[in-house]
Structures are given as structure tokens and as C-alpha cells.
Image (tube, rainbow, N blue to C red):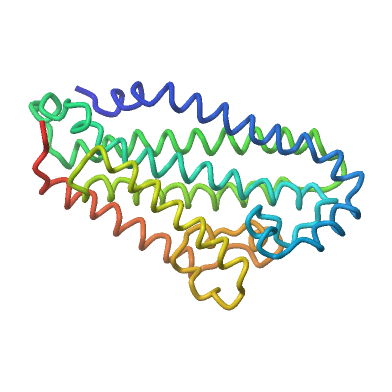
Amino acid sequence: MNIFIREMKANGKALIIWCISMIFLVIAGMAKFSTAGNNGVSYNQLMSQLPSSIKALFGLGTFDLSKVSGYYGVLFVYILLMSGIHSITLGANIISKEERDKTAEFLLAKPVSRNRIITEKVAASIVNIVILNLITLVSSLAIVKNSNTVEAVNKDIIMLMIGMFILQIIFFTLGTATAAIVKKPNSAANYATIIITVMYLLSVIIEINNKLTFLKILTPFKYFDSKDLMYGSGFDHGFLILSIIIIFIALSSTYIFYKKRDLNV
């Protein structure tokens, strides 16, 4: 039995829905750029009058809305959130669904080890994540190009997508670790949702209060901040190393706890 193919088929419909949703998000977001671009100065003046808490909540930050790069930078906050939700719920569900759907006995009755089961499930999930990332990249490049004829933004978008991919893997492995650790399989997705919600809210709080920047280490949303990637010095090497450590620990925990787990069949 090829577990990889089984998982690809099982997640196919959901992946299509997520890809369409991501394309729609980019289209809907960039459709408003022409209006924002024509009134860029007015928009920027309006944004400057908003409380910092409101700007942080909606991801406005210090972006120049008269430029397509600034407008996409704001939109990317929501793209990042959506991709994070997809990744962490995918990770939680792909580990917990065998117990939840009462198919664990069928799977474990096959001549395969638990490590192989996890490996093939992870491989299938990473393919799903790569597809979603590439669809988002291609649609972003095409739609932004259609909305802009002056500013060169392809390099910025590619850099943002690389950061998004790393974040997707972080949240995916956090999801698998959560599902492997919690005792109730039906609760795995709920815990995963709580984790990403808390991390996103923490990123908003940090954006509001500059004195809390030391808390960035606690939320991957700040590892690949769009304004830092686009207007700063690129990727922070410290956060890249931290990302690798988190992924390694979370994935190792998945294997360790799933192997020791008493599955409810």
C-alpha cells in the first residue's frame, strides 16, 4: 500500500479549495490597488491618522499604499495567515485522522512501521504545501504584473514566498507534533487553531508596542515580516536558524510521541 498516494488523493479536494481561495484572495486584494494607487497620497495621509493598534491589526504598518509593493505587502499579511492556518491544520489532521476516523487499525495492520507511516504522510503534506505556495507565487506574479506597469516587484514577491514556505513548514510540523502529543484526536485541530491564533495575536501586539520586540522569538509570523523582507536587509539569519531548530524539534517530537502512542482503533 502506497501511503503517499493515499494521502495525496485524500487531500486533493481540500488542496484545490485552498488554492482557489488563495487565488481569489490575491485577486480581490489587488483589484483595489488601482483606486489606492490613484489616491496614494490621500490613502497614506488617512493611514497616518489611524491609531497604531488599528494599523497593526490590519497589517498596514509603514507601507506606502501608492506603490504596488506596499499594497502587496499589506495583502501578504493575510496570505501568510491563510497559509499558516492551512499548514497547521493539515499537520494536525494528517496525524490524528486515523484515530478520529477509526482507520488506524486498518493502517497499522499493514506491514509498515509507524515511522514509515509518518514519513509518507509528511512527504505528501509537503507536496501539498509546495503546490499551494507555487500557486500563490504564480498567481501573485501574474495579478500584480497586471496591476502594475512601472515598479519591479517580482524579486520582492519571490522573497516573500520563500519566507512563507519556511513558515508553512514551521506551522505544519507544529501541527503534527500537537496531534502526536494530545491524547484526544478530535481535539488536535482545535489545539492547532489555538496555537496559530495566539501567535498571530502576539505578532499584532508586538507591532503595536515596540517595547515588546523581544517577544518576536515566540511567533513565527515575525520571523518573515513582509516589511522587513521588502524594505530591510532580507532574511534574518538568527530567525532562519531558529526556524530550522523549531522544525527539527517539532518533527522529532512527532516521530517520538506517535511511536509511543496507544492508538484508539
Q: Which residue is at 22% across, 49% downward?
A: 182
Residue 249, percent across and down? 29, 59
Asked if residue 81 lies left or right of residue 107, the reply is: right
Residue 166, percent across and down? 47, 52
In the rendered image, the vertical position of residue 38 relative to residue 55, given as above or below = above
On-image quarter of the N terminus:
top left
Asked if residue 170 lies left or right of residue 80, the reply is: left
Asked if residue 214 lies left or right of residue 24, the reply is: left
* Nearer to us in this view, 170 or 84: 84
Q: Quadrant of residue 129?
A: top left
In the rendered image, the vertical position of residue 67 relative to residue 242, given as above or below = above
Q: Quadrant of residue 205?
A: bottom right
Residue 72, percent across and down? 71, 47
In the rendered image, the vertical position of residue 181 relative to residue 31, given as above or below = below
Residue 230, percent across and down? 69, 58
In the rendered image, the vertical position of residue 215 relative to residue 247, given as above or below = below
Q: Which residue is at 42% across, 48% downward?
A: 169
Q: Quadrant of residue 96?
A: top left
Q: Exactly how many numbered labels are in the figure?
A: 0
* Nearer to us in this view, 56 or 96: 56
Q: Which residue is at 46% across, 68% downward?
A: 217
Q: Which residue is at 25% across, 32% downward?
A: 97
